[in-house]
Image (cartoon, rainbow, N blue to C red):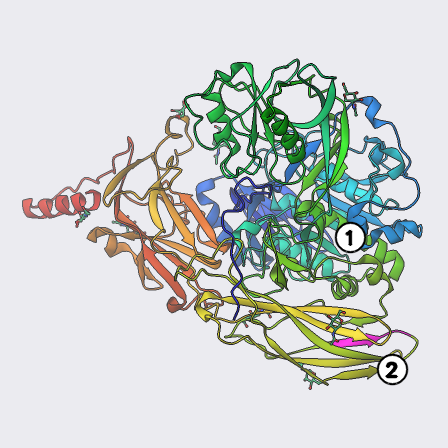
Amino acid sequence: MVRLDILSSLLAAAGVAQAVANTPQVVPGAYIVEYENNQDTAAFLKDIKGEATLRKNLKFKLFKGASIQFKKLEKAEEMAEKIAEMPAIKNVWPVKSYPVPQHTVHSTGSALAAELKKRQVEGKDLFTPHLMTQVNKFRDAGETGKGIKVAVIDTGIDYLHPALGGCFGEGCLVSYGADLVGDKFNGKNTPVPDADPLDTCQGHGTHVAGIIAAQSSKNPYGIIGAAEGVTLGAYRVFGCTGDVPNDILIAAYNMAYEAGSDIITASIGGPSGWAEDPWASVVSRIVEDGVPCVVSAGNDGAEGLFYASTAANGRRVTAIASTDNTLSPALLSNASFKVDDGPVKSFGYTVGEPGAWDGVSLPLWAVNFDTTDAANGCDPYPDSTPDLSGYIVLVRRGTCTFVQKITNARAKGAKYVLFYNNVVGTTAVSGVVEGVRGVAMVTADQGAQFIKTLQAGSKVVPTFTDPETAPKFLANFDNILSAGFASTYTSWGPTFEVDVKPQFSAPGGMILATYPRALGAYAVLSGTSMACPLAAAVYALLINARKTSDPRTLENLLSSTAHPNLFQDGRNAYPVLAPVPQQGAGLIQAWDAARATTLLSVSSLSFNDTDNFVPVRNFTISNTAKEAITYDLGHVGAATGYTLPDNGSATPDTFPNDLTDDFATLAFTPSGKITIPAGQRRIISVRAAAPTGLDAKRLPVYSGYITINGTDGSGLSLPYLGVAGSLHSATVLNPRLTRLSRTGDSLNIAVAANTTFILPPAGHSNDTAYRNTTLPKIVVELAMGSALVRIDVVPVNSCRAANATTVLGTKSVGMPADTPLYYNPRGTLEASWDGKLSDGTYVKQGIYKLAVKALKIFGDRDNVDDYEKTETVPFRIRYAGAPEKRSPIPFQSARVKKTVAKRQENCEA
Ligand SMILES: *[C@@H]1O[C@H](CO)[C@@H](O)[C@H](O)[C@H]1NC(C)=O
Ligand SMILES: *[C@@H]1O[C@H](CO)[C@@H](O)[C@H](O)[C@H]1NC(C)=O
Ligand SMILES: *[C@@H]1O[C@H](CO)[C@@H](O)[C@H](O)[C@H]1NC(C)=O
Ligand SMILES: *[C@@H]1O[C@H](CO)[C@@H](O)[C@H](O)[C@H]1NC(C)=O
Ligand SMILES: *[C@@H]1O[C@H](CO)[C@@H](O)[C@H](O)[C@H]1NC(C)=O
Ligand SMILES: *[C@@H]1O[C@H](CO)[C@@H](O)[C@H](O)[C@H]1NC(C)=O
Ligand SMILES: *[C@@H]1O[C@H](CO)[C@@H](O)[C@H](O)[C@H]1NC(C)=O
Ligand SMILES: *[C@@H]1O[C@H](CO)[C@@H](O)[C@H](O)[C@H]1NC(C)=O
C-alpha cells in the first residue's frame, strides 16, 4: 500500500475558493404540502379552517400542492402533523431556504460604452473551456443548439446586455421565463413576482447565461456561448440579497418544465447528501418525465468525502463537478507607473474592497524583496519601518488572511495596499480595515517586476485613476498550476446512501463570461456554478446531434465518453486517477458523446457499502454501428479515499483526504474480448471485490473506471464506486461536541450545569422587548449525515417526570418546536429554544435536559438501538414576568399544604 503525501492548509489564501458550509435554514411555520389528487387549494385551506395562509400555489402537472404559512407559529408543527395524516395529502415538508452559491469573483469589466464595441470572433472557436470539452468542434461545424430551449433557474439574466440578445420575449435570445420573487425579496419577506426576469443586481445568472449562449459577435473579448443558437428561459428565484426557499425552487422547476424546456439547469444548492429532500425529489420527477436536469455539484470540496449537495444529489439528477480552465483570464484595470525619471509605463490590476484609488500616486514600499516569501507581511512590521502613510505597500499573497496583512501595514500608517499574487492571475481582495482606503492586486509577474526594481534601489511610483472608469483589458495567463484537474473546491460525494455523485465534470474554475452591465458587463468567476451551464449547453448540442432528449441516454453517453484525470491537490498532481466521488466520470467530451456508436445502459455503478454490498452489477453494451465490434474490457482503479482521519476521530477529514492506491478487483462475465454483432447488445456482469487491507473503520471509498475499448477505435469508460466499510456502524453523532450553549455565543461554548435561562413569556419571543433575550441553544455536531435527529425535553424534577411519556427509551415531555430534523448533512446543527414544544405548548418552569438522538445511516427509525444518543447538562427554565400560576387549593391540612408547596418548589427550583 502506497500512501500518498498529504498537503495541509493549502487553502489558506492560496488562490482556491474557500468553501463556506451553508446549512439550509428552515423557514418558521412554512410547509410544502403535496396532494394525492388534483385537490383545490382553496378547498384545502378551508379544510384546515383558515389556520394557514397560502404562500404559493404549486399546481403543476408533476406536482399538485401548495406551500402554506401557518398563522399561529406555535401551532405549526402540530397542524403540519395533522395535515400529514389527512387522506388527501401525500407529503408535507418544512420549507427550507438556500443561499446564492458561494462563487469567487476574480475580476469584472467596466461598463464603459467604448468597451462594449462588438468584435466578430473570426475563424475557429479557440475558447479554452470549449477546447477542453470538444465544444469547439460543434461550433466549427455550425452546430449551435438551434431550436433547443434551456431554462436557467438563477438570479435572472441581464438580457439587455448586447451579448445576451438585448431584449426579452419572442424572437429574443432570452425568450421566456419569469421573476418569481422581485428585487426586494430576501428569502424571508413576501415575494413580489412579475413577468420580467431581468438581473441587474446579482450577476450570477447573467454569467451562467453567457456560458451557455453569449453571442460571439456581440462582445469585445471573444466570449462564445457553448450553444449560441439556443433560446434561454430565465427563472429568477433570488432577490438582490438573501436566500431562496425551496417552495419557490419547486415552482420554478415546474414552470420551466411546463414551458416546454428541453433542459433545465440550476447552479444552486446546499449541503445535504440525501436524495429524499423535497426539492431534489421534484427535480428527479422532471428527469423521469424526460427532461434532463443538470445541477452544480457544490463548492464544498474543502469538506472532504460525503458532502453531496442538494438538488444535485437527487436520483437521476445530473450533478456537475468543476475542472479548472487551462487559461486564467483576468479583466485588469489599467494604471500607469514610472521608475525614477523614466518614461510612463502601464500595468494591470484588480481593484478590491475598499477601492478609493482615484488620483493616488505614491511610491511603492515592500517589507522585503523575497518573492518566494510564503508568509510575506503576516508578522507585525519591524520597528525600523518608516511611516507608511506616504507609500503604497506591496505585499505578496499567502499563508495568513488579507485582513491580517492589511492590518500589519496599517499599524505603520499605510492607507493603500497592493497585493501581488502567489498563484496565476489576480483576484478581487476583500479587506476592509479601519483607515485603509484602497486595496488591489497585481499578478505574480507584475509583483516580481516591481520588487526587482525596488531591490535595485529605484523608486517606483504607480498612478491610479478611478477604478470604476479605468480602461479594462483582458489578460490571459496560462494556468500552469491546475489546468484540466478537478477544482479543489468541487464538492465530493457519494450520498449517505452510496448513490454515485457527481456524474461528470466541466470547466468551472476561472471562466470569463457576461455580467450585468451595471456590474461591469463581463467577469471572471469560479465555481461549480460555472461548470453546470456548460454541461447544460452540451446537452443542447447533443439533443440536436443525437435526435433524442432522453436524460438517461444522454447522461450515459456523456459519462462513457468523459475523460477522467489524475488527482491534484491544488499544488501537485499524483500518478493515480482522482476518485469518482470527486470528478465523477471525468471531463466531458461532447463531440465523442455525439458520435459514439457504442452505448452503455448506465452512467455509473454503485456497489454500496459492506453491509449492503452488491457483489454483482450488470450493464449492457449496445453496438449501434454498422459492423461487428470486438470489445476489450478492462479496469483502471482510481485513488481510494479515507473518509475519516487516522487518529481515531469520527469526524471526517477535510480536503485533501488520505488517499491510497489500493484498488478494487473486478471480474467480468463474459470475460476477455467480447464481439457484438452490428445492432446487438450484450449484458456484462461485473463482480467486484473491495480492496483488502484497508482500515474499514475509516470508511474507505474505493472507485475506478471499467474501460471498454472497441476494435472501431472507441474507448469508453464506466465509473463505479463502493464503500469498504459499514455506514451503519459509522458514528453519526459527536457526543463531546453536542452541547447546550446560549444564543449570542457564536463560539457555542457549553453552559455550566444548572444555568438558569429566563425565557420570554410564552408566545412573546418575537416581541421587541424580548428579541435580545438569551435563549438556550442546542448545538448538535453530526460527524456523518443523519436522516433523523430527535431532541427530547427530559424533565429532571420528579413532578415533571411523572407527567412525561417514554419515547424510544427516553422520558420526554415533548420535542422543541421545529424538531425533529430530517435528512441532515454532516456538520453543526444549531437550534435556539424558547420553551415551545412541537405540539405548540410551552414547557413548564423547571429543570430539564435535552436528549439528542441521531439515527444511524441505514438505521430503523423505530429501533432505539439504531440511534446514537447524548444528553445536555441540566438547565433551569423560568419565564420572564410570568410566574407560573398556582391554583388556589381551598381546603388543605397544613401537612398537605407543605407537601404541595415542596413539590411546587421542586418543579420550579
Ligand atoms: C493603459 O495606459 C497607458 C498609459 O496611460 C496607455 O498607453 C495604454 O494604451 C492603456 N492601455 C489600455 C488597454 O487602455
Ligand atoms: C445501498 O443499500 C441501502 C440499503 O439496502 C439502500 O437503501 C441504498 O439505496 C443502496 N444504495 C444504492 C446506491 O443502491
Ligand atoms: C445479470 O446478468 C446475468 C446474466 O445475464 C443474469 O443471470 C443475472 O440475473 C443478472 N443480474 C441482475 C441483478 O440483473
Ligand atoms: C483501453 O484504452 C485505454 C486508453 O488507451 C487504456 O488505458 C486501457 O488500458 C485500455 N484497456 C484495455 C483493456 O486494453
Ligand atoms: C444541578 O442541580 C441538581 C438538582 O438541583 C443537583 O443534583 C446537581 O448536583 C447540580 N449540578 C451541578 C453541577 O451543580
Ligand atoms: C417577528 O417580528 C418581526 C417584526 O416585528 C416580523 O416581521 C416577523 O414576521 C416576526 N416573526 C415571526 C416569526 O413572527
Ligand atoms: C439588542 O441588541 C443589539 C446589539 O447588542 C442592540 O443594538 C439592540 O438595540 C438591542 N435591542 C433591544 C430591543 O434591546
Ligand atoms: C401533566 O399533563 C396534563 C395533561 O397534558 C397537564 O394538564 C398538566 O398540567 C401536566 N402536569 C405537569 C405537572 O406538567
Q: Nearer the viewer, residue 448 or 682?
A: 448
Query: Residue 368, percent across and down?
Result: 52, 29
* Mark 1, secondary structure of its residue: helix
Predominant SS along the magenta part: strand
770 versus 312 height, above or below: above
- The residue range painted magenta reads 620-625
Q: Nearer the viewer, residue 8 or 849?
A: 8
Q: What's the residue type where badge 1 is placed?
A: Met
Identify the residue at horizontal 82%, vertical 75% (top origin).
710
* Mark 2, secondary structure of its residue: loop
Q: If the image is split into quadrants, where does the C terminus sit?
A: top left
Q: What's the residue type where badge 2 is placed?
A: Pro
Identify the residue at horizontal 88%, vertical 53% (top origin).
137
Q: Which mark is residue 905?
A: none
Q: In the rendered view, does 835 fall on the left or right side of 627?
A: left
Report the image quarter containing ligand 7: top left
**Residue named by callout 1:** 132
Which of marks 2 and 1 precedes in the sequence? Answer: 1
Query: Residue 692, percent across and down?
Result: 51, 76
Task: Say if mark 1 contacts mark 2, CB within 8 Å.
Answer: no
Query: Residue 113, percent across and down?
Result: 82, 22
Identify the residue at horizontal 71%, vertical 53% (top origin).
484
408 versus 270 height, above or below: above
Q: CA distance from mark 1 to mark 2?
A: 33 Å
**Residue named by callout 2:** 677
Tell me the quarter of the picture where residue 545 sits. Answer: bottom right
The mark total stands at 2
Give the crowd class for mark 1: few <14, some 14-19, many >=20 residues within 10 Å.
many
